Image (cartoon, grey):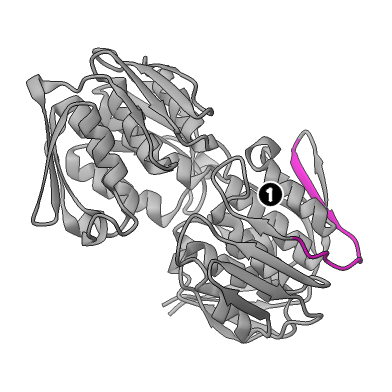
Amino acid sequence: MDRIRIVGGNKLAGSIPISGAKNAALPLMIASLLTDDTLTLENVPHLADVEQLIRILGNHGVDYSVNGRREKQQKGYSRTINFSARNIVDTTAPYELVSKMRASFWVIGPLLARMGEAKVSLPGGCAIGTRPVDLFLEGLQALGAELDVDNGYVIAKTKNGRLHGNRYVFPKVSVGATHVLMMAASLAKGETVLENAAREPEIVNLAECLIAMGAKIHGAGTSTITIEGVEALSGARVRVIPDRIETGTYAMAVAMTGGDVVLEGARPDLLQTALDVLVETGAEITPTNEGIRVKRNGAGIAPVDVTTAPFPAFPTDLQAQFMGLMTMAKGKSRITETIFENRFMHVQELARLGAHITLSGQTAIVDGIARLKGAPVMATDLRASVSLVIAGLAAEGETVVNRVYHLDRGFERLEEKLSGCGAVIERISG
């Protein structure tokens, strides 16, 4: 099993290209199920989750081909990929595939809208109510779907072969459910109004894709989205937006280590709240023609309190990374997690590096210290694992991050990008 070895203490300087957003690429790929024409996606990141979804879509009959520029064809680089779902050969998404990636449950919306039926395993075989999919199911029922849950599968059918537009108010904001209902409503008969919808940039990217395919959608990026269903959708060519979580992660790495780095292709509008927080810590953030320049001089890191919340607030997917930064702040900070109930698993691993963190319910109190010391640590999930990398870049001595397959799910060429800016970091295979 691969590990990542880091020798901390080097400032970062240079440039880092920002990859396409995983959280945007996945729903865009799933949208290919809505049409029998070819959907071409540019700037698709080369990640484990993307490769897994390609396999899942292939199970339904989706063909794909890669036709990016020659120099970008090597492993680990973003690509242009053509997806063709001309012939849907299977409307079942089996447990052995869905259990490996939760987002694959989202195929239920396009399959139901286009084929009139779908049989999709509950993600991870979990009971509805634990990281629930009930919002997905309630929303699809509002569009006229007939649903049954049997032996761990959701069995969905439409009346008369087509969904029907309706008004649905999300009881709480859900990015995944907004993705699914927006896709399903695009082929429904009549108008659908989604209220209290997610506003994330990835929602907007999907809406732009669906509109390019012929959908009639208004309000994406606001809390009310209106979709006028059409008979059929066509192919399109769409670019995946730059990854705002990768952008924020590398910005925090520069803030942690000091230095001066340009994040090429980054868009500040996708994570303005997080960038504002970094400015409060003492980092200098400057938009440029190339992307975003992040710089921190020799002054210490200022402590800042944050609370995660849906976009446009501070993202939960940057909470662990920010906690890593705060471990060396000059003072005490409070980090409150409101999205997920169990997203502090990185606390004990950061403590192995010497961090002083105490938990009080959904709040972590971080008492910054002057020095972290390298140690072996264990990645527990995608975002937690990269927080350990950030801490290791500033820690004295050697840090070895184990179970880095979590990192490979969401960070393209992480070691190469960081080492190109002066970090001493390498992957150890086996």
- Magenta span contains residue 299: yes
* Residue 229 percent coordinates (x, y): 30, 15
Q: Is residue 201 left or right of residue 263?
A: left
Residue at 30% over, 17% down: 233
248 lies above or below 213: below
* Residue 177 percent coordinates (x, y): 35, 39
For the question of whether residue 122 can be seen, the reply is yes
Q: Quadrant of the C terminus?
A: bottom left
Amino acid type, mark 1: Ala
Q: Quadrant of the N terminus?
A: bottom left
Residue at 22% over, 59% down: 127
* Residue 77 percent coordinates (x, y): 52, 48
Q: Nearer the viewer, residue 178 or 95?
A: 178
Q: Is residue 328 left or right of residue 21?
A: right
373 lies above or below 16: below
Q: Which residue is mark 1?
A: 274
Magenta-drawn segment: 290-304
Residue at 26% over, 23% down: 35
Extreme-right residue of the structure: 298
106 lies above or below 279: above
Q: Nearer the viewer, residue 27 or 237?
A: 27
For the question of whether residue 66 can be seen, the reply is no
